[in-house]
Structures are given as C-alpha cells and as structure tokens.
Amino acid sequence: MELIVISRPDFFKAECHFVNQLFEAGLSIFHLRKPAADETAHRKFMDGISTGYHPRIALHHFHSLANNYHIHRIHHTESFRKERNNVELPESQILSTSIHHLDDSTQIGQYHYSFFGPVFNSLSKSGYRGIIPPDFRLGKQSAKPKIIALGGIGLTEIDKVKAMAFDGVALLGCIWSDPSQALTNFKKAQAKCLAYEENLTIPL
C-alpha cells in the first residue's frame, strides 16, 4: 500500500532536514503544499532538499518550478481541476488531484491518483470531520486513478484504511504534529504499509 507524506501548510525550523530524513528512510512521494507561501519561499524550501530527492516531490503550487528542479509530479486542487475541465493533460507528468465525493472519481481518468477524504476526523484541522461510515469499503476501481485515503490517519488507522480497500494513505498530522518524532512515526507507518499483501503502487 502506497505511503505519501504531505507537508505542513506552514514552514518550521529544520523542516528540510526532517524531510530529507524521510526520503533517506525510503519515502517515495512527498507533497509540497504551502498555500500561503510565495514562490521565493517555495524555492528556498526546494534548495534545502537534496537534489536527488526532487523527483519524489509533488508541487501543489507554482508548477512552473518543476522545470527548475527536475520535478515531474504535479498536483491539481479540486477547484483548479474543475476550472480546467476537459483540458488534455500532459502525459509526461505524474498528475494527482483531490476529490471529496467518490462520484467524482469518474471525472479524473487522466490522473494517476487522487486523495479522498477526510476519511477520519482530522488530526491537524480542528472541526474537520470524517465523511465516511465505519463499515465503508471502496468499490473496485479501474487501473487509474488510484484512490489515496486522507484525513485523520494515524498509526492505528492504517489497518482500518487497508480494510477499506484504499490504494494508499496520505499522512500529515501523524508525521508533523511533533517533528522530532517524524522519522520514528514514518518508519512505523512504512512498516504497516509494506506488510500489506497487495502490491498497489503509484508510478515513480
């Protein structure tokens, strides 16, 4: 089962050091999402990440930076995707998006994977409550796109997500609520995901 880490929306001390540690430990996909940050701040962050890890980063904003940092992962927000409805997307990029209603999965066939949630009550956003029932199970999906569970997923929820038949999990609060424990918690989550018997992977 795929394991993705999403950045905190704010910057914090030694953030790049912690992210590099996660990459060193085997993190395959990191989503850089800083909605309030400007392009200069994004560049500063990217400059703090070892260049060999740049291709593992998905940009949520300032997509033009992809050319400068050898990035081929681009994330489209739900609103951005709907504004560009029916526009053909480049095949050279690995594209992701977000949905909040599973019915929308029929509209994102050009994407490699999509976040869906919040699955559980958010760990990082107060009042951001889960939207699925306890007995939920994801219906059989076609080869594309993969559906990645997002929202309120801590170490104890990963097994629940497996049982719901998601293709992967995205972690935010579980990793960044205490950055000093980010590597430890990532390794625990990684072990749980690697133990999943099905080989459901997103292209690297």
Image (cartoon, rainbow, N blue to C red):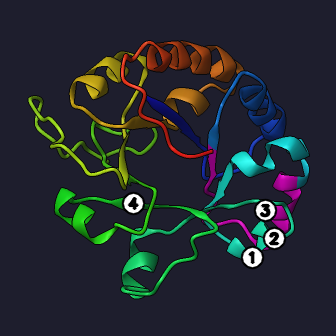
Q: Left of 158 or right of it: where is 100?
A: left
Task: Check disc 4 and report its element: helix, strand or loop.
Answer: strand
Q: Say which amino acid is labelled 3.
A: His
N-term-proximal mark, 4 vs 2: 2
Residue bearing mark 4: 98
Callout 1 amino acid: Ser
Q: Nearer the viewer, mark 4 or mark 2?
A: 2
Within 10 angstroms of label 1, few (less than 14), some, or many (20 or more) residues? Answer: few
**Pointers 2 and 1 in contact (C-beta within 8 Å):** yes
Of the numbered discs 3 and 4, the one sitting upstream in the chain is: 3
Q: Looking at the rendering, which quadrant does residue 82 occupy?
A: bottom left
Hey, what amino acid is under mark 4? Ser
| Crowding at mark 3 (Cα within 10 Å: few <14, some 14-19, many 20+) | some
SS assignment at label 1: helix
Residue under label 1: 64
N-term-proximal mark, 3 vs 2: 3
Task: Please provide the residue range marked out in magenta.
Answer: 30-46
User: Which of label 3 and label 4 is nearer to you?
Assistant: 4
Residue shown at the point (81%, 70%) measured from the top left: 67
Q: Secondary structure at mark 3?
A: helix
Q: At label 2, which amino acid type do we have?
A: Asn
Picture quadrant of residue 163:
top left
Residue found 27% across the figure and 36% down from its top = 120
Q: Are marks 3 and 2 in contact (CB under 8 Å)?
A: no
Circle 3 sits on which residue?
42
The reply to whether discs 1 and 3 touch (Cβ–Cβ < 8 Å) is no
